[in-house]
């Protein structure tokens, strides 16, 4: 009787082994994989500074970009007393017809613009007394270079910055 | 009658007879083999042993970037693998990344094994901060990787998230075959340059507003993983290996 039980157990064990051996083969699928990753750091923001010299009723303005600044476009505008008309111009600067003079090149990090000349006209030199205040203000703006689908660069002077709360005008503006 | 047979088998004479029969059979089979060796010369023939080596390669703009191929002939079977980097040649040397500009980023899969296979791709897009940690506050949507799904690739919408996209190639990729591209080009959305955080502080001259760009100094990352599984019994193999129920009908995989 005991021998019979042992025989049954051996047969059962053999069956289990046969079944599990079969299922093991069924799960052994051929698989493989390959992966790769990569990335690039974004550099945004610019810092520019204006320098000016004044002599002979002429302001000579240049704008310099910091070495680690992203490429920008520059435009500038001069204000003065209505009695003394201002004449602006310079190599690489062109009148936009909206009061601004536009620097026609992209200003990359570490570069400076050519001179924008602001001449003050109609100055009655003989009547000017010592201590008389005379203000000519030059403001300038920078805008990051953007690109169209065909990779043509452009400046979006009306860009609106998104601060998550409200919206404000884009570009950097400084006065001198 | 049965009783007589049983008696014959169990008798010493029966056992002796069976032994003699077995010895005779064994001897005659050896002689047969020896005769066959003497009288038969086989023709020269060649045989081809099919090795079941699976392998897959990821290609970027036509260049092999990463692969993992099984080679059963080398070292009694070993994996040959290489893990390269994406986007290394995206920006020309001396130039910097231009926001909003499309750059070619054509990703394909090649079956570099000896058996046919089905493949899928897991694509990840994310931002890393200066410390190399994932920046969860910045959206992966602004990493604009153009996917192609009109050429046999299909997106598994159920398994995809904002950061991850899973694509399946619906056809069998034959040994040595390269799939159509599942991506074509990549750009960083121009709105990245307009996302700012502004803080205000009181100064002696009044209120000062400090504007900083949210995406300045962060790194955008793209990661691609290709999975391949054997063509044979693909439906069960995919369920077992990838945990995804698919249907394979007439060689076409559908989700």
Image: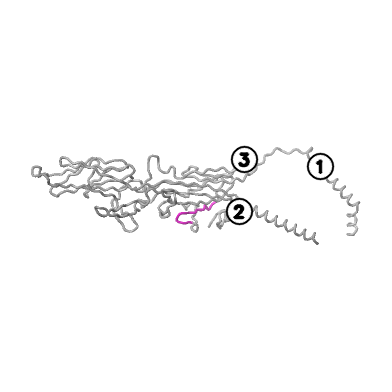
**Lateral position of residue B206 relative to residue B182, left or right:** left
Note whether A108 is above or below B140 in the view shown.
above
Spatial CA distance of label 3 from label 2 is 28 Å
What is the number of the mark on residue B233?
A: 2
**Lateral position of residue B153 relative to residue A79, left or right:** right
Chain hosting mark 1: B
Answer yes or no: do the residues labelled 1 and 3 have beta carbons within 8 Å? no
Q: Which residue is mark 1?
A: B30
Q: Residue B167: horizontal and vertical position, in percent?
A: 50, 53
Foreground residue among B241 and B54: B241
Q: Earlier in the sequence, mark 1 or mark 2?
A: 1
Q: Residue at x 80, y 39 (%)?
A: B34
Tell which tag, 3 or 2, sits nearer the viewer: 3
Spatial CA distance of label 1 from label 2 is 44 Å
The answer to whether dots 3 and 2 both sit on one chain is yes
Callout 2 secondary element: loop
The answer to whether dots 1 and 2 both sit on one chain is yes
Foreground residue among B169 and A158: A158
Q: Residue at x 41, y 55 (%)?
A: B137
For the N terminus of chain B, the image quarter is: bottom right
Q: Which residue is mark 3?
A: B75
> Residue reaching furthest bottom?
A1
**Lateral position of residue B44 relative to residue A37, left or right:** right
Callout 1 secondary element: helix
**Lateral position of residue B16 relative to residue A7, left or right:** right
The answer to whether dots 1 and 3 both sit on one chain is yes
Callout 3 secondary element: helix
Tell which tag, 1 or 3, sits nearer the viewer: 3
Q: Residue A154: horizontal and vertical position, in percent?
A: 31, 47
Over which residues does the magenta segment extend? B160-171
Q: Residue A35: horizontal and vertical position, in percent?
A: 51, 47
């Amino acid at each position: 009787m005991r021998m019979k039980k042992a025989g049954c157990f051996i047969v059962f064990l053999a069956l289990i082994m046969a079944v599990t051996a079969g299922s093991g083969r069924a799960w052994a699928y051929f698989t493989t994989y390959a992966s790769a990753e990569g990335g690039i750091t974004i550099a945004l923001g610019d810092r520019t500074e204006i320098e000016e010299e004044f002599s002979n009723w002429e302001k000579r303005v240049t704008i310099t970009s910091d070495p680690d600044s992203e490429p920008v476009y520059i435009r500038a505008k001069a204000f003065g007393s209505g009695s003394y008309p201002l004449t602006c111009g310079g190599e690489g600067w062109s009148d936009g017809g909206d009061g601004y003079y536009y620097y026609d090149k992209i200003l990359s990090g570490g570069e400076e613009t050519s001179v924008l000349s602001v001449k003050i006209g109609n100055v009655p030199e003989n009547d000017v007394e010592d201590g008389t205040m005379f203000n000519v203000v030059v403001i300038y703006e920078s805008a990051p270079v953007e690109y169209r689908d065909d990779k043509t660069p452009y400046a979006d002077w009306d860009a609106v910055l998104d601060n998550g709360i409200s919206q404000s005008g884009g570009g950097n503006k400084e006065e001198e | 009658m049965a009783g007589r047979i049983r008696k014959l088998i169990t008798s010493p004479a029966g056992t002796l007879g069976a032994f003699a029969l077995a010895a005779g059979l064994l001897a005659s089979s050896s002689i047969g083999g020896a005769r066959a060796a003497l009288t038969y010369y086989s023709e020269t023939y060649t045989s081809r042993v099919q090795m079941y080596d699976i392998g897959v390669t990821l290609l970027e703009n036509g260049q092999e970037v990463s692969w993992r191929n099984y080679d059963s002939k080398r070292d009694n079977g070993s994996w040959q693998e290489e893990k390269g980097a994406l986007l290394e040649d995206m920006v020309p040397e001396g130039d910097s990344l231009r926001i909003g500009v499309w750059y070619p980023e054509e990703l394909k899969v090649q079956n570099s094994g000896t058996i046919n296979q089905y493949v899928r791709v897991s694509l990840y897009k994310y931002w890393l901060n200066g410390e190399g940690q994932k920046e969860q506050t910045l959206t992966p949507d602004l990493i604009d990787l153009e996917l192609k799904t009109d050429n046999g690739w299909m997106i598994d919408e159920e398994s995809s998230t904002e950061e991850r996209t899973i694509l399946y190639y619906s056809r069998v990729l034959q040994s040595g075959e390269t799939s159509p591209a599942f991506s074509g080009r990549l750009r960083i959305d121009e709105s990245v340059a307009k996302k700012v955080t502004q803080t205000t502080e009181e100064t002696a001259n009044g209120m000062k507003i400090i504007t900083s760009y949210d995406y300045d100094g962060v790194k955008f990352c793209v990661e691609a993983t290709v999975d391949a599984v054997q063509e044979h019994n693909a439906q069960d193999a995919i369920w077992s290996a990838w945990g995804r129920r698919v249907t394979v009908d007439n060689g076409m995989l559908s989700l």
